[in-house]
Amino acid sequence: MVKKQFSFEKILEFTLFISMLLAFLDSYEFQSFPISWLGNLLIVIICLIIFIKEKIKINSLLLLLVSIALLPTIFNLFSLTNSSNDLLYTITRVLSFIGFVFTVVVISKSKYKKIVFKSLKNVFYLIFLISIYTYIAQLFNFYEPVRNRPGTGILGFDIQTNFWISESHRMIGTFREPVFLVSILFPSYLVLHYKSLNGVYFYFISGVLFGLTKSELALIMTIFFVILDFVLKKGFNLKTILFTASFLVCFFVPIYECNISPSNYECPQNLVNEDNSFSEEVVEFQASSPKDFEYQNRERLDSISFFLNNLNKNTGYGYQVTNAIYTNYLATEVNSEMYLTNRTLPKYLSVRYLSKSFGSGRYFLTYENINLQNNFMFNLFSIGMIYFVAIFLAILYFLNNNKEHGFKVALILISISLASIEDLLPIYGLYLSLVFTLERNES
């Protein structure tokens, strides 16, 4: 019996390690199926096995709350226009949400939390090693696996960006964008920090990892983390100082790929035609590239504007409608500018101008939905104000039980809420279940 239990725990540890690793492989897909989706699916399957093995019970009140949260989506099922695509999109979002809730419940009640935590820690270190290698590989044109998952750009720019001509090179690791790396890995860093004793090397490599992303989200979360750590510990310790110092150095010190590796085939000096024409075009592009705050933060400013203008009428739009409503809100100005064109020649323009961009430069808003890339806003408008109430009550509950623990839970909830990934992924549920229940140093 003991041998059988030991064997199950070993298998569980291995499968958890594989599933988390796959969940972090955001840059890759197999047969048009994102590998990160497979990782999150495996997490849910593992939770289902644990659920059956340990005979875990789910509170009926929780089932009622989940049903209420999905009511806007259910009501809007009848308004789907492109049945196949819209239905698949909606099912994916709904299953992700249900998987998130299921993971929180199962891991919180499971006796295998130590194994889950150990697997998470091992995967975090492995992802750091892979990320450092890919960072160096991109600088010096070393081999790295082909990033075959489409990027998040609009107008057909589907190739993932891993080269910056006039900006510092950025860490993307196994993710499509630096901000996605921060969105997924920073909450895991917080869980590992709060729930186990870690060596100084852990804080050094974490600072390097997040600093090299040059992501503003990483800077914001680091500020929150340092402030809370200072308040809870009534001062700084060596590990926090080491993390902060390594982060700030890597964040603010520029690393220009073409200065470090001038032989890189993507550098302008290596893209010169015989008549030298192309290099001049590249230089001209660099000189004319927009650098102002509004241009670089257009998506954030758009989402904040949408949030402020639509919060008072939010009753829950449903997972399948939120992005369309967000896009329509942003398209108001474009529609006004392009009134005559939109009314007379839209089909002609979509064929004549293959980029489908015309006039204002944001013509795509008239025909292509874009994502509200903020986890909190997307779920708030998809589910309704009950989502905000649930988060508020969860923080209040933990603060009431233990203020220090409550602040830690709040910070992890904030890190997930600020993420640029809209879905409430099962991996997020795993983070929350660990920080809800696992005592410090238990690992």
Image (spheres, rainbow, N blue to C red):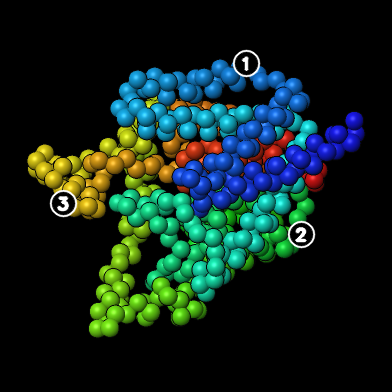
User: Of the residues under marks 1 and 2, which one precedes in the sequence?
Assistant: 1
Q: Secondary structure at mark 3?
A: helix
At a point 42% along the width and 31% down the height, the residue shown is: 88
Quickly name the residue at label 1.
Answer: 60
- Checking the image for residue 85, the label placed there is none
Question: Which quadrant of the view contains residue 242?
Answer: bottom right
At a point 37% along the width and 29% down the height, the residue shown is: 84
User: Of the residues under marks 3 and 2, which one precedes in the sequence?
Assistant: 2
Q: Secondary structure at mark 1?
A: helix
Q: CA distance from mark 1 to mark 3?
A: 57 Å
User: Of the residues under marks 1 and 3, which one precedes in the sequence?
Assistant: 1
CB of mark 3 within 8 Å of CB of mark 2?
A: no
Q: Secondary structure at mark 2?
A: loop
Give the label, 3 or 2, closer to the camera.
3
Q: CA distance from mark 1 to mark 2?
A: 42 Å
Mark 3: which amino acid? Arg
> Residue 332: horizontal and vertical position, in percent?
22, 40
Horizontal side of residue 306 vs 67, given as left or right:
left
> Residue 233: horizontal and vertical position, in percent?
72, 52
- Checking the image for residue 352, the label placed there is 3
Mark 1: which amino acid? Ser
Quickly name the residue at label 2.
Answer: 199
Give the label, 1 or 3, closer to the camera.
3
Q: Determine crowd level at label 3: few under 14, some 14-19, many 20+ residues with C-alpha closer than 10 A.
A: few
Horizontal side of residue 354 vs 279, given as left or right:
left
